Image (tube, helix red, strand yellow):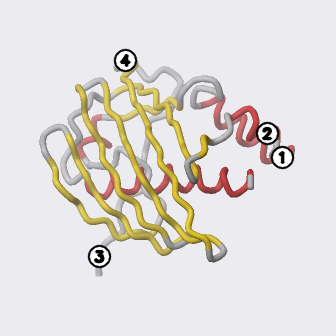
Amino acid sequence: MRRFRLRLASLGLLLSSHGMAVQAQNAPPIKPGLWEVKSERLVNGQPMPDMAQRLKDMPPEARARMEAAMKARGGPTGGLKICHTKESLDQGRWQEAQTRCKTDVGSRSGSVWKWHSSCTEPMPSETDGEVTFASPESYTVKTSTTMTMKGQARTSQMTMTASWLGSDCGTVKPFTAPAAPAKP
């Protein structure tokens, strides 16, 4: 069950991020620089275990890789640190897009963008998402994902809150998401 929750949490982050990257046809109304992103996840209505517990349950080599990655990005107790450049924001590549999904952009006002993604890989899923830009220094992403795993429907809700920390990214490397694949 713990492995399922960890995989689902990772997938939820990818799915929600994928929807934002695809639907961000214009630059999001946020500042370039260093951002801290904190997330809360529910799987089938239950909170995900905290990162310390998830790390404890990992094999030693996987735990070492995860700890090194978290240290580089802010650590397990704080939020994930991300550096967005003006270029990545201008290109609409401000979130990670690594899954193969079809995303339909829904309504989009100046401060609220909505989307729906249907994915076939790494497992079939449907995600509804919404990002609300409270200011150029703050945004919140909410997603709801349903997937079928071993014949059973699973649901997850995730809320990510991002806060701008400043224009200097310090030692955090700029975020570079892959460009969207070219359409045939």
Q: Which residue is mark 2?
A: 64
The part of the image, by quadrant, that contains residue 18 is bottom left
Hey, which residue is sitting farthest front in the picture?
45
Report the residue at 50% width, 29% height from top.
Answer: 81
CB contact under 8 Å: marks 4 and 2: no
First in sequence, mark 1 or 4: give its number.
Answer: 1
Q: Is residue 77 left or right of residue 143?
A: right
Report the residue at 49% width, 31% height from top.
Answer: 38
Q: Which residue is mark 4?
A: 166
Label 1 and label 4: CA atoms lie apart by 34 Å
Q: Is residue 31 above or below residue 26?
A: above
Q: Is residue 115 above or below residue 34?
A: below
Q: Which residue is mark 1?
A: 61
Label 4 and label 2: CA atoms lie apart by 29 Å
Between 34 and 37, the residue placed more toward the observer is 37
First in sequence, mark 4 or 3: give its number.
Answer: 4
CB contact under 8 Å: marks 1 and 3: no
The number of numbered badges drawn on the structure is 4
| Local secondary structure at mark 1 | helix
